[in-house]
Structure formats: C-alpha cells, structure tokens
Amino acid sequence: MTATSFPHHGLRLPSAEEALPGRAAPLHTVPARHLLLGTPLAGPYPAGLEVADLALGCFWGAERTFWRLPGVWTTLVGYQGGHTEHPAYEEVCSGLTGHAETVRVVFDPALLPYDEVLRTFWEAHDPTQGYRQGHDHGTQYRSALRTHSPHRHAAALASRERYAAALRAAGHGPVTTEIAPAGPFYPAEARHQQYLAQNPAGHCGIGGTGVACPTGAAGTGR
C-alpha cells in the first residue's frame, strides 16, 4: 500500500513541487566505520552481501534492532523515499522533504535469511500507525520497506499480506507500510549513526504490537 495522506491526524506528504529544493552534494560525510561492528558504513559492499532499506519510526532505535542480529555486516541510518536531494535532519523533520527515517541493513543471506530480516522489521514496530510511531508524529516516521531486487520485492509484498492478516486477526487496523523499489538513500549526519551506542540513555520510541509475524512461506527465505 502506498498512501499520501492519513486523514485521522491531518498529515500528508509533499508533492515534488512543494518539497524543499535540496542540493547537489551532501552537507556532511559519513563516518568510515560502524562504531560497534567495525565495518565500513558506505558501499560498495563485499560480494555476497545484500541490502535492505527499512523505515520503522525513529531511526535511532530501529538501527539498534538490526545491528544486534547475527549475520548483519553493517548498518547506517539515512533518509529515503522523498524528493529533496541530500537533505539535512532538520529539513526531514519539517515534513517538507517527503523522506522517511530509514535504516540501511547490509547482511549476509547465508547467515541471516531475508525472511528473518522481514520478521524483525514487522515485529519491531506497529505498521498500522500511518504517519507516526508511538509518541513520534510526522511523515518521517512512517513505515516503509524499500527493495533491491524483484525477488526480494515479491517476498516483501507477500510478507506484508501475511502480517496484515495476523494483525487483523488480533484486532488491529490495516497496515500502512509502503513497499517500493529502493530509490536514492541519503546517509544521515554522523551524530545519528549508531546513536544509541553513542548515547546509551537516548530516546527510543519504537515498539511492536506483540503479534508474531508468520514466516517460511515460499519466496521469503534465502
């Protein structure tokens, strides 16, 4: 499902004409290595690894969820899914870029099946909340999943249908998660990379529904 507005709280994504203009080059550089894993943040990545781009609310806590998984090679946070080129954090938070706060997860599918990446994504947040996640309100906190191959795209769509059915059965509303092929990913400022490792007492507003995600269907594994 792709939506541009959720009337229940009056927010909407800007059109390309309404979005902030952005810039041709980044405002900042990405740290060379992951603070905990010691691996490079920026690509190109070693052969055999895959990339998943996942938006599930504030990217501080979302990134920590994924760097803890065995088989994850590196993680970094950034902005994706909007119109503004090379945005700054404050611009994204204004709601005028169209981007979602996103975690890029680079993983080894031989050690971490894509099915497990999807399960972790669904169970770590509430994908029925539209333009918010918990106490965090804004279009930048929407649920979104960006894919890097037709096979993974089909797997993501199938997993959304399965989880939507599980949520309905548990009394939750419809899933609002966007699923689309990955577009430009703009890494966030250095202070946001591995934020909860730099600031262990920092805020983490994401939380799941408690509903388990069914796994193991054809097309979602390795």
Image (cartoon, helix red, strand yellow):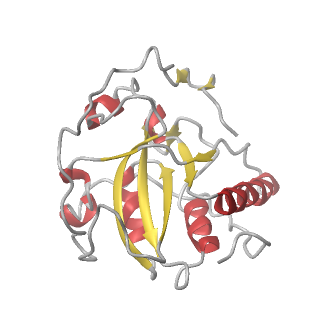
Nearest the eye: 84 or 55: 84
Question: Which of the 4 image quadrants contains residue 121?
Answer: bottom right
Instruction: Give left or right: position of 217 versus 180.
Output: right
17 relative to 125, above or below: above
Q: Do we see residue 194 in this rendering?
A: yes
Nearest the eye: 6 or 23: 23
Q: Do we see residue 68 in this rendering?
A: no
Query: Residue 89 location, x and y as percent?
Result: 28, 37
Quadrant position of the N terminus in the picture: top right
Q: Residue furthest top?
A: 17
Residue lying at 61% horizontally and 65% vertically, measured from the top left: 118
Residue lying at 45% horizontally and 82% vertically, measured from the top left: 70
Instruction: Give left or right: position of 132 versus 97.
Output: right
Residue lying at 37% horizontally and 29% vertically, measured from the top left: 84
Residue lying at 73% horizontally and 43% vertically, measured from the top left: 173
Query: Residue 85 location, x and y as percent?
Result: 34, 32
Instruction: Give left or right: position of 44 versus 222.
Output: left
Quadrant position of the C terminus in the picture: bottom right
Query: Residue 62 location, x and y as percent?
Result: 42, 58
